[in-house]
Image (tube, grey):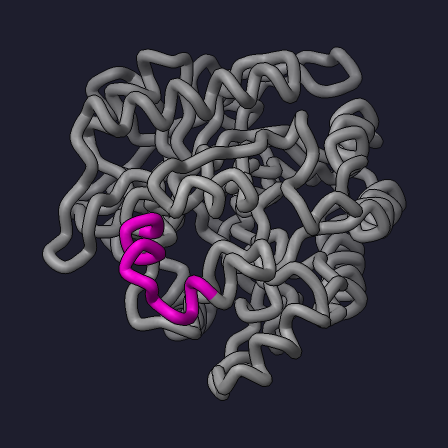
Amino acid sequence: MNSTLYLDKKIVVFDSDDWGMLGMRDPGSFERLKAKGYSQLGQSNWDYYSLETKEDLEALYSVLSKHGDAYGLPPIFTCNFIVANPDFEKIINTGFKEFHTMDLSQGFPGLWQNRDKLLNMYKAGIDRGLIYPGYHGLCHFNYEAWLAALRKGEPDLLDCIKEHIRYIPSMRDRDFSYDYIADTDPFVFLSLKEQEERIKNGISTFKKMFGLLPVVTTAPKCAWNSDTERIWHKYGIKYIGAGNRRLGMVPDNRLGERNQWDMIYLTRNVNFEPVRKNACQDAIIEIDFLFKAQQPAILETHSINFHSSIKNFRKKSLESLDQLLYLIETKYPDVVYLTCQQLGEILEQGFCYLRNGECMDARTHRINLPYLAKFHFNKKKAALKRYFKTR
């Protein structure tokens, strides 16, 4: 029987992935690819993933700044960053034999140069206490496999790289979206040495960008293994964020559990992708349940929700976020907004320092509770219905 974590504070954490990562470049590139016969393009929201703009960040900061918790502090997004992107021109010039990157401190490659002020915007959000940087990965894809496919002349990749786009998953059968995976058929992780090379480079780049080493990470696609954890620990990571899944691995890790290196898992338990229908309503129901069960609410969300370059997801998402924050603060005026690091510190030592310098204590305890041991957010609606009928 698994034990369930309890806290005496109502805590909300926004844990958000894919910041700084390139997708579809602009509407023109979308239409040119569509005209080449990729009829499936546009059927998935992820086809419209691009890259946040200065205006997207300003709009997000504006909504967050309107709200406050029991300490008068605004909600804060833990933004998990991809720290480097392909340098397309250099890669093309090598005949796809060598992989070259540009990290976010250098701006963005080639045709993406109109986003070169983004790092300043990220830092402004950090200074204002509206975002906190976590480490997501170096590039969010297996670039050796990508280069090999380019050398084979796979048409969709050649069409994409001309537009300075890595690839679009819906345009192809094989997805490369893993930092630590060598192959998915069969499922094989990169060697410890290969993983260390990526993580060492990524964390060094993170420090160059933000002036500090990351202590929080979430693996791209939630795919990692014990070798990954060993290397994360070596380079200073303390807290591991994830959904209720570990691709290719069992069992799942529950919130507050520790691994052999004493790193703490911060398992997400609320799915908040506001571009989806009823996102706000579903999230507040889940938060209600978690607070009744004396557990923190860790909301999983992705940067695409706040993009507007190809398709304006931002407007609907910010309306949903604004509504959700209003409902949380109205129903739970004692709510506290924390970063992943602050929640990790509470689980580790029983307190954390808030952004105003105040020290906040939080008591934690565990009991055995079979019901919550099976509580995964992808099955939440049925579970919630059963739960509330017994109240």
Residue 14 in the image: above or below residue 279: above
Q: Position of residue 255 (x, y in %)?
A: 37, 38
Front residue of this view, candidates 55 and 391: 55
Quarter occupied by residue 143: top left
Front residue of this view, candidates 187 and 349: 187
Q: Residue at x 49, y 55 (%)?
A: 166
Q: Position of residue 318 (x, y in %)?
A: 77, 60
Q: Position of residue 53 (x, y in %)?
A: 77, 50
Q: Residue at x 32, y 16 (%)?
A: 233
Q: Residue at x 53, y 21 (%)?
A: 205
Tell me: 213 left or right of 189.
right
Q: Position of residue 204 (x, y in %)?
A: 49, 16
Magenta span main SS: helix
Residue 366 in the image: above or below residue 145: above
Residue lying furthest left: 186
Front residue of this view, candidates 231 and 270: 231
Q: Residue at x 52, y 80 (%)?
A: 41
Residue 225 visible in the displayed image? yes
Is 151 part of what is drawn in magenta?
yes
Residue 288 visible in the displayed image? no
Quarter occupied by residue 239: top left
Quarter occupied by residue 310: bottom right
- The N terminus lies in which quarter of the figure? top left
How many labels sit on residues? 0
Q: Which residues are magenta?
A: 146-158
Is 11 part of what is drawn in magenta?
no
